[in-house]
Amino acid sequence: MADSFKPHDAAEVEAAIRSALADGKTLELTGAGTKRSIGRAAQWDATLDLAGLSGVTLYEPEELVLSARAGTRLAEIEALTAARHQELAFEPMDYGPLLGTASGAATIGGVIAANLSGPRRIKAGAARDHFLGVSAVSGRGETFKSGGRVVKNVTGYDLCKLLAGSWGTLAAITDVTIKVLPQAETEQTILVLDQDDIAARKVMAAAMGSYADVSAAAHVPAAPAARMAETAPIRTAVTALRLEGVAPSVAQRKSLLEALLAPFGSLASLNEVNSRAFWRGVRDVMPFAAAGPVGQHDVWRISTAPSQGATVGRTLAEKAGAEVLYDWAGGLVWAALPAADDAHAPLVRSAVAASGGHATLIRAPAAVRAAVAVFSPEPKPLAALTKRVRQSFDPQGVLNPGRMWAGI
Amino acid sequence: MSIVMPPFDEAVLKRRGEIVAALRRIVPGEGVIDSEAAMRPFESDGLTAYRQLPMVVVLPETTTQVAAVLGYCHREGIKVVPRGAGTSLSGGALPLGDGVLLGMAKFNRIRDIDYENRVAVVEPGVTNLAVSKAVEHAGFYYAPDPSSQIACTIGGNIAENSGGVHCLKYGMTTNNVLGCELVLMTGEIIRLGGKHLDSGGYDLMGIVTGSEGLLGLVTEITVRILKKPQTARAALLGFAASEDGGECVAKIIGAGIIPGGMEMMDRPAIAATEEFVHAGYPLDVEALLIVELDGPQAEVDHLLERVQEIAKSCRAVTCRLSNSEEERLLFWAGRKAAFPAVGRISPDYYCMDGTIPRAKLPLVLRRMQELSAKYGLRCANVFHAGDGNLHPLILYDANKPGELDRAEQFGADILRLCVEVGGVLTGEHGVGVEKRDLMPVMFSEEDLNQQQRLKCAFDEKSLLNPGKVFPTLHRCAELGRMHVHAGRVAFPDLPRF
């Protein structure tokens, strides 16, 4: 029986969870469903569809704050803030292209539950860093709130941090308050051409250690670069560095950066329009899009120290023929590997273990996601703590059980 | 002392000699302190109105010792209070008479500075300022800068999620830490995060940060270090009405400018600081605003001009822009000396710490003046205007009977007011014991119960820093109980598809 709840307010969410508790049923939490294929493939008794909780409830541009119900479309929020020259500075990615789901459809609740971010993560943080306040219903069927609508707040535990990236396994988020920030007036991107992965690491480290205040740093090897309209004509790998701000500042930093990077290789640049399009492509990992030539590959998302990214990427390329794309100054590795029954999990896990960090299997057929660990396995005392934390919110395991780890 | 702490565990106190001996076996030499005279310096933290001698002080030097001490206390049912430099303004490190005070001061080494990854790995007893000093020669710094940064430690900063004047642009502690080694109350050692970004599982680093020493003992921390801005310039703006100052702050942010620092002072604070440091502040204004821009020279010059235009449009009666580093520091000199300056005009002062939506500032200032009259106590205000964090300083004389009580009641009224206008009880000083009993003003019982359930996941026996943050102590078993109604046909009007 595939029952489905579609509540329209927080009280109905509470009622739905209590009903599931009483019936001993499990619930799959969804918003727009754009990230539904991320996580372990598990079976749930019913769906708790939160898309009906919609609408921006507060937007005060001069206070840099916005509140919305969890099912509000991100696109609606972005349009509203853009009209006041503001934005969500964490630049949340759109998983639509990569997963072959609807593009531009994600809800703010989903963005936060997955702790999304984008290229500006290295400067501005992730969803977690902009998530000021929450109201949610726990797996106990009880409504609770945490945080507030002000940036500076240390009153009680910061449950927002815990809920961000918990993939709906602790509570059903019903209302969120987030920080908004001014959009940059303009931007430009400098490209260093034809670097291999190891050389690119040095380019990005030099730029990040300079006064140029780089807001995004990525390395796109030749094959994926050929699939992006802005870099295809260049026909080489590109190491890209974004500068954002007021025009005089961007101009000054551009000269600084060009002088610094000239010794590394030939330079090119992207104007404001192309820069925006290019970084959207990096953000959404367009070269590995479901509709593209590596659309059938398994895709891993690996977070490691920036100095270690190239080492991980080369290992995966040499041993499994991976195509790799680096964001976050080298610290975020997107790897597309030829499809395999185990998604090359042992290789990926051992490469990440050697470098430090974590890896998540983002795209793979359901059968594969049922067979291998999708999220990084945790060492024993930490795994036990994770389980206790989960139980403190959802003792009966009613919300998305098994989505992150088996048995949790 | 109006705060009630958990009753002493007589059974534990009777075993004091045996407990001290057991702790000495774990931490040899001078690391265990049990004489009253030697424990005296630990009886209080920055909230000096509250004092309590601990049962015993332990100063471990290694993670293994911390784990062994906690494991022992967990098995034996002994309470533990962690302490960094003891600068907490909310009594977070207030000892318990039947508990071990675990001081982390000996964890004072910087273990690794990694410029390529722009991180430093430090022990919790390293002071906040020492991190910046260690990387200064390479042009880097650690962004969170609480005003106690010369003394406060990174471990304490984690516990309190400390802020500083640069929070609006650079974030609080939680936005600037990447990982830690954490010892649980059971003695288990876990690692959270590292040199990479975000968590692969639950963001436990995010929950430990700001947990006020109730969840675990941090023994190593990985922090982000940032390249120091190339230049900084400040504007000193005076307004005849606090409304004008508030409007100026809103317009600066509305214009898309995020200053590195934006500080406001009210008339009593201006007068006290000017008399103390002679920074050249105007004395005929109701509100003084310092706006600092940092970054590349071209950007700073460009934005400072815009700030000047905005200030004029908001009827600023004073408008000075710093033209040298000396001048910029002079603008700041008064603000940075605000607390000692107020200390000169009053025998005692009580520093509050609430946050409000910025637009509510004029209203809150007016209501505070009414409260000031009601309680017969003067009040000076310094305000992190960029992020709405208010620090009212209530002036009183502890030697006059009843004044401390009145100051505390005045302070509690201010915090209730902050919550009433949409703000919070504490912006950066923490709840501790000071604001513990005010938590129900902001949170329902359900909110607090969920927070305490999380505490139980880390510390099932409630032995770590009990009596802080939560007004009521519940047993974990009681909190964990579920009340599921057995009725099968519930919620008939729920939409189902």
Image (cartoon, grey):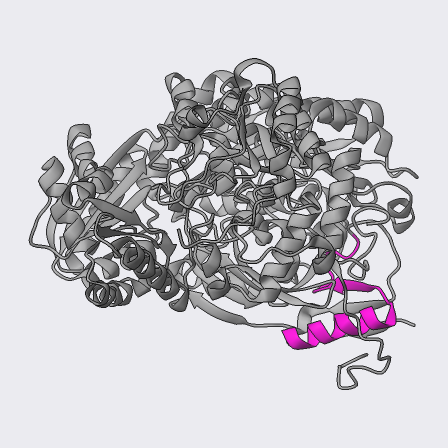
Residue projecting furthest to the top: B29
Residue B363 drawn at (x, y percent):
27, 67
B58 vs B329, nearest the viewer: B58
Q: Quadrant of the C terminus of chain B?
A: bottom right
Q: Is residue B372 above or below residue A41?
A: below
Please state the extent of the stretch shown in magenta in the rendering: A8-37
Above or below, comparing residue A24 to residue B260 in the picture: below
Residue A143 in magenta stretch: no
* Residue A276 seen anywhere in this rendered image of the structure: yes
Return the x and y of residue B193 as percentages of the image width and height: 64, 34
Residue A84 image position (x, y, % from top left):
40, 62
- Give the image quarter of residue B140: top left
Q: Residue at x 28, y 47 (%)?
A: B262
- Snapshot quadrant of residue A295: top right
From the viewer's side, name the closer residue of A290 and B199.
B199
Tell me if residue B407 comes above or below residue B117 in the rendering.
Answer: below
Whether residue A35 appears in magenta in the rendering, the answer is yes
Q: Nearer the viewer, residue B487 or B257?
A: B487
Residue A232: in sight, yes or no? no
